[in-house]
Every structure is written in structure tokens, then in C-alpha cells.
Amino acid sequence: MDETVIEYIRRTVLKIPRKEIKIMLQKWGFLSRSQLQTINFQQTKENISRRVALLCQENSADIKEAAALDIIYNHVYPNKRLWSVYQMNKTIYQMKEKETEFFDIRDFKTKFKRKLHSALENVTINFREYDDSAIWIRIAWGTPYRKPNQYKTSYVVYHSQTPYAFVSVSMFRSNVPLLLEALVAASNYNHICAMELRSHSLNSLKEIVFNRYSQNFQTYYPEALQEHSVEPESEPQIVHENRKTKEKIQGMNQQAFWDCSLPKLEYAQYKLETMFESDPKMGVLHRKQPFRCLVKFSSPDLFESLKSLAATSMAETSLSPLLTCIPQKPMNNFRITEETSLISGRLSTSLCLN
Amino acid sequence: MESVDGATRSLPSIRRLSRGLPFGRARGRFGLSPSGRLLLPRNADSQTTAFLLRKHWALYSVTPLYKFSSAHLKAYAKLLSAFIAAEKQKGLAVEVGVELDIKVAVTSLPDLKGSDQDEDAILVQLSLRSQAYQKKSEEKLVWSGWFCSVYGDDLSKNMPEDFTCLPVFLANGAESYTSIVGSWFQKTFDCCFHRLAISPLSLSWMAAMWTRCKVDKTASAMELVFSVPHLPQPLDILYAIHPEDAKALWDTVQKTPGEITQEEVNVFMDCLYSHFHRHFKIHLSSTKLVKVSTAIASAHCDGIIKFLQSQYVIEVLMLLTELAISQIE
């Protein structure tokens, strides 16, 4: 029996907040009810973890059980990881077929494992399905000469009814191409590409991406929403009867951006490689080369803060399309070069992506 | 940017910065061309500065110390050590559990100064010596603090004999040690420590001054961090500029070598703000500049500094001395 597995389970338990340990162990279901009753959940986490380890030893826990507990932990606390979004596709003709395809989970798992094992013998793969048709995949990577490292895992969250996969890689970035290949093969797609969208908030990413997905089918036209103006009832900025402020807010309401309830993103990053322009009278920098800079907006809730910023004099009433396009694109990592037309306020779709 | 009051108060002293630049420019009245005695900056050697690089130092301004003498440093170390032990007995201990012995060392750093009129810098170090290990090699440095003055003549020139001017104090380590050491100095030398905040105005001066320095290929970006705190959800904006491009911009803004004016700093910052506004339609000038970071050093508005290159330590200390003196006066 592998002591490293028991130690791994013990360390996973240590990560869980003390109040949540009992519930999580119940969700896990590996320890029987009578075994759980022998644990004193009022003692220190250290002691609880040791007791759990002892019980797991009695039950001869193996890596499959340990992996299951880790998946449950990450499912409850996904925001501890950084998630990137990938989109898969096929040719148009094949897409039509795809819509009517029946998703076979066993087939998916077999193909996924087969693809990974064909390249790498030392890899631990575990799956867990959830009600919202989300498949959580946990992968622990090894090398030809080393057993898989259970502490540095990659996660994939794949919603089988959509072409989107959310990936959290952890350390071994060199394994990403293999991982993506396995995903494509298992889900019967042809291509997979990275979207410039990253966040710790998995739910926000899902909101952004799935809204768009359903919009594609509903042929969403943002201009149509300009007719519709919503009174911002709970807008905290409207405290004083400043007519200018009210006008500003109404101006804001005409934009589709403000009408939608927006998901929670923590940052938006822009790598700017545009030319520096200045008043010739100032006699400053006139170069042929771009002015290279990086801008990153961070907030516990980026869209909320941008909304309230726009109601102040610190920003123009209509914020730059660079900011308002984020939910529609959807992207939160941009590289802007001179090819994108900024002056007129319209953002061309030919952004050069990293 | 800053409120009018703050700007008026710090402007006179900030203007002096353009006189005291270590380019070999003479100390004359504001606006005069170089003439007379050339002022060559003392270049503190890398051995002396090794201890202060790449650490975060909390900044304080210190009023002149009464009857302090660099001849009695060993005695001061003993007294401070006894004071710390007494504080621990009183229950204001910083360490819980194993009985730990704190060793105090007070030394002088003659290299860390600007002119000969400056006092020698004084370094205080607290090390932990576990009683389990009797050997000297088992000491662990837990706290450092040092006093210094770089071109602090404006403060010291009118001071009576009994006073020692070391207006800048930098501390690294637990806040609790800082307050114990600070209270001992305050009691013993009748001085006052005040946290030295750095205004957005001063931060933009630092951005301009540190951008102009020559950078090598691997230099880090010039980073400005702006904060918009009074929103329901706070917003931070990081604006990082490639060091070559930042320097190229500054080189076209600066009109006279060896001299920097408030006008030039304003133009430099305005250029950066307008480039940003062009893309994002946000007026960075109405947000609060909270942090500046370049290859030379980084400074935070709460009064935290980090030195990154030994050859520019004296120059940065000169800026800090100016700020400390204007807070004291």
C-alpha cells in the first residue's frame, strides 16, 4: 500500500477550511458514516488530517480515491487556479453533424486516456461528472523515468454540449499541446485554439463564454439595444442631483455594454504597440517605431468598477471600445498594434493575437 | 494630481532637486549655469550597499538627535539591547515560544552620504540568537534600520552643535521591532519619527529622474501604478512602459542636460497620460499615482522604497533626504 497516497490525501484535507472538512468528506464518500463519526472535527486541522489518514490506511485507499477527493476540492474552490479558455471546432458541414451527435462519455474517456497514454506512460488521469454536464478531468504528469507528480496537476473542465474547455495547467506547460490533442481527439473535433481569456474566476469565464455561445444562435445585435434605456435604480453613484451626472449615466445606458448584467472578471491586460502621437508644438517624441507599453486593469470586479468610473469625471461617458468589447469578444488579454483602428472608436476584428 | 496646498508646500524643495543633481553641476542658485566648484557624487561601493539592495524599506523622517555621538555606538547597542529585553519582560515580546536572545549591533557607514557636511549613516541591526545554539554562526538577522543624510545641508547648516542631523530613517523587518527601536531613540535623543509618505507629485519626479538613467538590454520596464480607491469596487491600473521608449520620450522632453524642471516632469507625465487616454478614454491624471518602479528603484506612496542598483543609491537617498527635510520643516 502506498504511503505517498495516504500522505497526499492528508495534505489535501489540510487545504480544506476546518468548517468544510466534514461536508467534503461526506461528498467524497470513501469513509463510512461510522468512520466519520469517530473523527473529532473540533480539533486542529493537523489532528483531523492525521485521523483521516489513519482511516484511509485502514480502508486501503488508492490513487483513484485520492484523485477523487482532489477533484472535489478543486470543484468547490476553483478560484485558487488560473483558468484559460479554449475553443474547439470542425468544418461547417461537420459542425451540423456534431450538433446532432449523441455524446458518449465512455467513448470520450477511453479516447482521452488512450491519446495521453500513447505519448506518456507515467500519467494519472481521473474523471468526475457533474449535473451541469461538466466533465472534470484531473491529470498528474510524470516523465518516462518518474512517476506522476500528484501535487502538480492540470485540470480540464469540459462541457460536452459546448465546444469550450477550461484548462488550468499548473507547472508543466510543455504538456499543454498533448493535453489539447487528447481533448480534441476525445471530443471528436478537428481543431482547438486558445482564446485570449484568462481568469481565476471559472464561473465568470463560463458566463462570458456561454452567453456568447447562446447569442450566436440568437443572432445578437448590440445596436438594437440602443432603443432600450434602463433606469439604474441601484446605481450607487447617483447621490447628488447633478444634472450632468444624470446625463452621463443616461448616455451610458444607451450602450449595450451597460445593459447587460456583466460577469465578474478580475483583470484585463493590453499589450500596446501603437505609435506615440503628440502635439507637434510640444516638440516631443516623434519616432517611426511604436511606443511599447503594457496596461493592466485589476479589480475584485472589473466591470463594476469600470461602470462606476465612467460615472465620474475621471473617464469619458463612453469608455473606450477596448474595454467595452471584453464580454463580446470574449477576451481579456489583448495585443494592440497600429492595424487596429482606434481613432474613430471602432475596433476592427483583425486584432493580432498572441 | 495633488491638492494645491500640498503642491505649494513641496514645490520649493522639489525645485532644489534640479540644483543638486550628481552630474557634476555646481551648487548654485536655481537656474544658473554650471560654474564654480564641481560637485562629484560620492559613489558608495557595492560592498557597503549590498545590505540595502532589493529589500523593502519603510521610510520615516527623523528630527535632529540631541547629544548623539558616533563615538558611543557600542554603548548605545548595549543600552538598546537592555531596553529590548525589558520590553520583552513587560510582555511586549515579539517572539512567542522558545526563549530567544536578541543581539543588537550599531555601526556607522561613512560611505553613505552626499557631502562631507553630512553625518555618517548609522546602521542598527537586530539578530536572533537561539539559546539552543551557542555558536555565533547561528545568528539570524531579523531587523535592520539605518539613519542617513545625503546633501542634507539645508537642515544641518543652522543646527546648534549638540544636534546630529540624520533626517532619513529606513526600516526593514517586523513593525514591532521598528516601534521598539524607534521609541528608544525617541526617548534617548529627544527626537521624533514620522512615517514619510510620498506624494504623487514626488512620485512623478522620481519616475522622470529614474527614467533618464542609462539602461542595459535587460532593464525592467518603467511601471506606474494608479489607484482609484473611492469606487464601490476599487480599481488599480498598471501602466508599464518599455524602458528604452520611456527614456527616448524623456530625452526629447528634457531641454537642458544636468537640470530637471517641474515643467519638464509635467510634460513627460502629460505625454504618458495622453497616450493612455487616446486608447482608453480615461484621465489618469485624476487618479492617484501610488507606485513608481524602474530598473533603479521602486517607491510606494505609503513611504516604501526599494533600491535596485548600487550606483544610484546615493541619488535616491538625496531625493529622500529632500522629502524628509520638507516634512520636518
Image (cartoon, coloured by chain):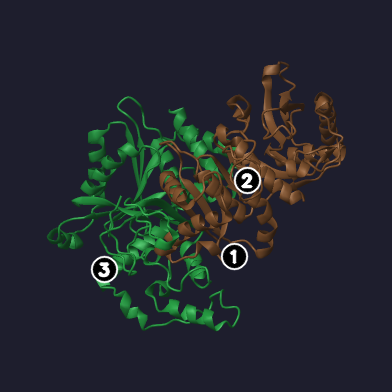
- Colour seen for chain A: green
Residue placed under numbered mark 3 in the picture? A216
Tell me, yes or no, whether dots 2 and 1 are on the same chain: yes
Callout 2 amino acid:
Arg
Horizontal and vertical percent position of residue B210: 53, 44
Of residues B131 and A20, which is closer to you in this image?
B131
* Position above or below: B74 against A56: above
Q: Which of label 3 and label 2 is nearer to you?
A: 2
Crowd rating for badge 2 (residues with CA inside 10 Å; few <14, some 14–19, many 20+): many
Crowd rating for badge 3 (residues with CA inside 10 Å; few <14, some 14–19, many 20+): few
**Quarter of the image holding residue A272?**
bottom left
Of residues A301 and A115, which is closer to you in this image?
A301
Give me the chain letter of mark 1. Answer: B
Q: Is residue A215 left or right of residue B284?
A: left
Q: CA distance from mark 3 to mark 2?
A: 64 Å
**Quarter of the image holding residue A207?**
bottom left
Q: Quadrant of the N terminus of chain A?
A: top left
Residue placed under numbered mark 1 in the picture? B230
Q: Secondary structure at mark 2?
A: loop
Residue placed under numbered mark 2 in the picture? B19
- Colour seen for chain B: brown
- Work out which residue is located at the far front of the displayed protein and give it: B36
Q: Secondary structure at mark 1?
A: loop
Give me the chain letter of mark 2. Answer: B
Horizontal and vertical percent position of residue B112: 67, 31
Q: Is residue A80 left or right of residue A344?
A: right
Q: CA distance from mark 3 to mark 1?
A: 37 Å
Callout 1 amino acid:
His
Q: Which of label 3 and label 1 is nearer to you?
A: 1
